[in-house]
Amino acid sequence: LADTDNFQANKMCCHCGGGTGKQPTPAPTPNPNVCKDTHGDAEDVDGDNCEWYTTHDEHGEDCGYHDDDDFDAYEMCCRCGGGSTGSGFSRLFEKARSAVPVAKAQILTWQILGMAAMAMMSGIAALVAVTRRASRRHDPKILAAGSD
């Protein structure tokens, strides 16, 4: 765009693909919002560090249960809500401790109750349908099959 008789960017400008000699590749700018584990050399009671939680504990259910004097998963491990983004804030979330597992258990309980209620309603609907068919046929064998 800014070429003149004395200057052609694609031949003379290193940034535009011209110039002479090999130009250094600029280092990528680190993302300031990427969480980094802060455990250093600390390990939990089982000899694991934050890498174990990242690799093996997808939902963070084991966070805090294996801590010892020098290892606190909630403070040090990104998977557990700790770690650091390097932005001055050491954590993205406040300590939840047992609130997360309790909330998951409550959700799971309501899901199970919902499924049980649906199954029960389906069973009742099937029973009503069979009873209606039997009563329309006036078949005493079918109507008496459920009674003792």
Image: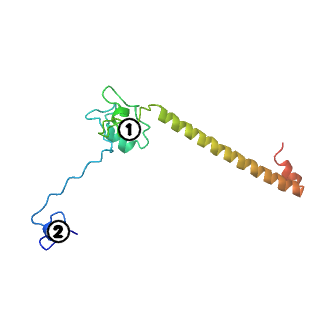
Q: Determine the residue positioned at 83% across, 56% down.
A: 133
Query: Does dot 2 land on a helix, a strand or a loop?
Result: helix
Looking at the image, which is closer to me, 137 or 109?
A: 109
Numbered tag placed on residue 110 in the rendering: none
Residue 107 left/right relative to 133 = left
* Residue drawn at point x = 71 percent, y = 50 percent: 122
Q: Badge 1: how crowded within 10 Å, few (<14), some, or many (20+)?
A: some
Residue 7 x/y as whole percent = 13, 70
Q: In the picture, which quadrant includes the N terminus?
A: bottom left
- Can you say whether 46 is above or below 132 in the image? above
Residue 106 position in % (x across, y down) = 56, 36
Which of labels 1 and 2 is toward the front? Answer: 2
Quarter of the picture holding the C terminus: top right
Give the quarter of the image for residue 80.
Answer: top left
The residue that mark 2 highlights is: 9
Q: Nearer the viewer, residue 23 or 13?
A: 13
Extreme residue in the left direction: 21
Q: Which residue is mark 1?
A: 92
**Category of crowding for the residue at label 2, using alpha-carbon neighbours closer than 10 angstroms: few (below 14), some (14–19), many (at least 20):** some
Q: Amino acid at mark 2?
A: Ala
Q: How far apart are the two marked residues, 1 and 2, measured between alpha carbons?
A: 46 Å
Q: Residue at x 88, y 58 (%)?
A: 137
Question: Residue 115, position in %: x, y?
Answer: 63, 45
